[in-house]
Image (cartoon, grey):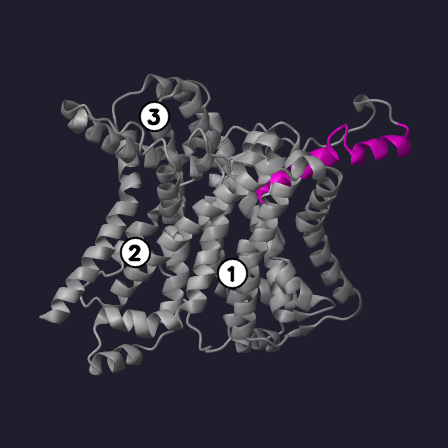
Amino acid sequence: MTYKFQLSKWQLIAWSTGLLLSTPLFFLLLESLQGDSEVFTHLWNTVLWDYISNTVLLVLGVGLLSCFIALPLGWLTAYCRFPGKKQFEWALMLPLAMPTYIIAYVYTDLLDYAGPVQITLREWFGWQSPSDYWFFDIRTLPGAIVMIALVLYPYLYLIFKTALREQSFKLVQASQLMGLNAWKSFFKVSLVLSRGAIVAALALISMETMADFATVSYFAVSTLTTAVYDTWFGYYSLTAAAKISGVMLLLLFLALITERFSRRNQAVFERQSSVNSEALYILKGKSAWLATGFCSFILIISFIIPMVVLLKYAVMYFDQAWNSEFFSYAWQSLKVAAVVSVVTIILSVLVVFYQRIAKQTNPLIPGRLASTGYALPGTVLAIAVLLPLTLLENTINRTLAPYDLDIGLLLTGSLLTIIFAYIVRFYAVAHGAIESSFSRISPSLDMASQSMGKSQGRTLRLVHLPLLRRGLLTAGLLVFIECMKELPAALLLRPFDFESLATHVFQYVSDEQLELASISALFIVVVGFIPLYFINRSMEQRS
């Protein structure tokens, strides 16, 4: 009897979490199916197709460029030995700590007509005006593709490199015995066996690309993300914004369904129980230095140059950037990120523990429901969160009206909205990390605890939580950094007296004055190093 009661308790917690965190998505879908909206009809007949085409081209471009960058890097660091390989393995992940709008501003400042690159070229060749020479304009759709890919390629690099190391080396060695050289083996064996991992990484990159607001807004590239923002702030039409958000979700789900359908009859089976750490190819001479040069080039343009520019700004404008605003905004950002990290960890532990002990069918559904928010771009998430909170707020105010009571904008006008939005969006990050850690705990420990008369709650507290410390820390750090970097949701949902480091930096970027917020930008980047350090340490221990 006690066991059944406890199981129903865990079931109630898990399903409540799943339904609560998926509520914004359901409300968004319902709102997008509402009657005709004049604003949406106007956009549909004028510019919406341009927004859709730009979004599709942006996603395809970033995905393709990420493949050109990440796949060779992953193969080189997983299978080859060359000068600097050990340093490149972790250093090539560093661009993930760099917000896209910062790298976009840095390269705009460097490559604009009044920037140092074009000034130097004019001095060298004696050019007098723009008509004397051609130079590409970075503030375009192709420029946005390059900027976003330079920040997001580490997702594919990390996942592809891990997939290669978990493959059986015997398959690659067998391809060599059949006369395939390194390149043919890469295309016919490694890529084929890693297709699932590559597609998963590209799906993640596609979601992050669709969610990007700052870079496309700064480059004046109209996408569906900017359309949602402009519709809400320009036309104040929640229904039209919801309909545009529905179009974004439709594109995303169509892409995922198409991919899964394309490999419905494919399966790969391997016998491999450990991670390979030895090198298959020992590069020497020209090949070795080409590998080192390629890795160095990517690292320099994606991280070192932006970091050097930020450090230069911080030194030159230290007096203006090191001020009370920085400390105030840093404290507000840290406070929100800490609360969201703790809440998402608690919810994730409870839901994943339910998945572990549930004896019924489909125990994974609550976790999948709760994780749907990660597919929502920041601007879409903001609209989705506002819908149920506004309805709840209005219902409470109408209920209290006969008693001359009014809660006002207690929900939609406070930090509660941002905190709830961040929990909805980043719960999936914590859930994935904690689920992975739970899977490494042997079920025999649960049975041993039960045989000693311990309840499931005490088993969780005394057995699982101590073993989950590293996973909990990793999950918390990942959520923490995502909250620190999140921009579009904060721009749409922040109260009047709230400013985060991300919104603070972006305002200066929009005004072409990143120098005055350089310390804030550096703080975001440096804090982003922390989870990357732990992820790298974890991978080294596994290998």
Q: Is residue 146 left or right of residue 55?
A: right
Marks 2/3: CA–CA distance = 29 Å
Task: Tell which circle, 2 or 3, labels the residue nearer the N-terminal end.
Answer: 3
What secondary structure is found at the residue carrying circle 1?
A: helix
Write down the region rendered in magenta. 99-126
Answer whether residue 254 is visible to the viewer in this image.
no
Task: Tell which circle, 2 or 1, labels the residue nearer the N-terminal end.
Answer: 1
Q: Which residue is mark 2?
A: 367
Q: Is residue 307 above or below residue 107?
A: below
Which tag is nearer the camera, tag 1 or tag 3?
3
The label shown at residue 159 is: 1
Q: Main secondary structure of the magenta part?
A: helix
- In the picture, residue 463 is in which quadrant? bottom left
The label shown at residue 238 is: 3
Q: Position of residue 75 (x, y in %)?
A: 61, 64
Amino acid type indicated by mark 3? Leu
Please tell me which residue lies in front, 274 or 357.
357
For the image, the number of numbered tags is 3
Q: Give the class, few, some or many, for how many residues have Cα within 10 Å of label 2's Cα (few <14, many ≥20).
A: many
Q: Is residue 119 magenta?
A: yes
Quadrant containing the C terminus in the rendered view: bottom right
The residue lying furthest to the left in this view is 1
Amino acid type indicated by mark 1? Ile
Task: Tell which circle, 1 or 3, labels the residue nearer the N-terminal end.
Answer: 1
Q: Is residue 158 left or right of residue 357?
A: right
Q: Position of residue 502 (x, y in %)?
A: 54, 39
Marks 1/3: CA–CA distance = 38 Å
Please tell me which residue lies in front, 460 or 145.
460
Q: Give the class, few, some or many, for how many residues have Cα within 10 Å of label 1's Cα (few <14, many ≥20).
A: some
Q: Residue at x 63, y 73 (%)?
A: 179
Q: Residue at x 69, y 43 (%)?
A: 310
